[in-house]
Amino acid sequence: MTLIKDARSLKFETAGVVGAGTMGNGIAQVLAASGRKVRLVDVSKGALDRGMSAIQKSLAKLVEKGKVTAEEKDSTLERLQPATDLDALAGCSIAVEAVIESLPTKMAVFAKLQEVLGDDAVLASNTSSISITEIARTVRRPERVIGMHFMNPVPLMELVEIVRGVTTSEETVASVRDLAVALGKTPVVVQDYPGFISNRVLMPMINEAIYCLMEGVADKEAIDTVMKLGMAHPMGPLKLADLIGLDVCLSIMEVLHQGFGDPKYRPCPLLRNMVAAGKLGRKTGEGFYSYTS
């Protein structure tokens, strides 16, 4: 991870992040590590505390591995300002939304963000599948709305999908692409279609792996082993689904199914049952695999 010592000449010197969950706190970390002042907002004080704790642990691991110094870790944490009210984002030139995958929720957040940040700010969404064009309908300047889809875990994964909505301006695309590069990421600009590229390709594979498990083609270990050893994937699709969150996987498959109207995107019934049972993967301690000690 590259840390920048002097943020005075940086574009988007002060950034906001909405949502302190896994993705939100990771985004806040990389923004702060790049030299930017970051205001991390979550309506839940508990979620905010957990998010800040996750950032501290992540930076501590980077220090242990020799990727950052203790001084750099401390300076990154000093740039982070946690808050429970979106009004704390006043003065930010960019805000990255990382709340739940719900279009009404995101539209409500964006409407408030434009009021707090003003018309000139860039409003970005970390959505993994929801239409940027739809999200932008709630603001006065939709040309300033863009997708900035980071990968999990954010501090380690290099890719950022830059999603261009129908109304997103070239200036906004260029500025956010430059920001991604400044964060040490590799940006890929994509058009606004359901699932973009990453999840349009990835989620049907995961969904098909779940079908294989449901139909008894093989057990979970065998399915994951075939994809790891046969296709050189670093992690099998069922274990990856547990890491992503089965509720997130289901949500993305529903967006794909609704957006394209094609039965090939129909979520597997086993996936629906797992989510209904509250077995969401690593975050609940059980999914296709058990993560309880």
Image (cartoon, helix red, strand yellow):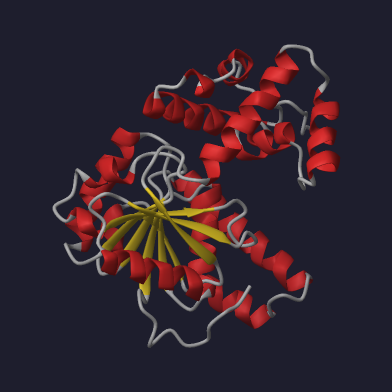
Query: Is 90 on the left-hand or right-hand side of 261?
Result: left
User: Residue 145's spot in the image, x, y percent?
Assistant: 28, 55
Query: Is 192 on the left-hand or right-hand side of 197?
Result: left
Q: How many marks?
A: 0
* Camera-side residue of 14 and 233: 233
* Quadrant, the C terminus: top right
* Quadrant, the N terminus: bottom right
User: Residue 275's spot in the image, x, y percent?
Assistant: 58, 21
The residue depicted at 41 percent of the width and 37 percent of the height is 194
* Camera-side residue of 35 and 242: 242
The residue depicted at 55 percent of the width and 67 percent of the height is 185
User: Is residue 204 shown above or below 232?
Assistant: above
Query: Is 94 on the left-hand or right-hand side of 218?
Result: left
* Residue 177 appearing in the image: yes
User: Is residue 106 shown above or below 89?
Assistant: above
Find residue 285 and report its image quarter: top right
User: Residue 268's spot in the image, x, y percent?
Assistant: 59, 18
* Residue 293 appearing in the image: no
The residue depicted at 65 percent of the width and 25 percent of the height is 208
The residue depicted at 44 percent of the width and 39 percent of the height is 129
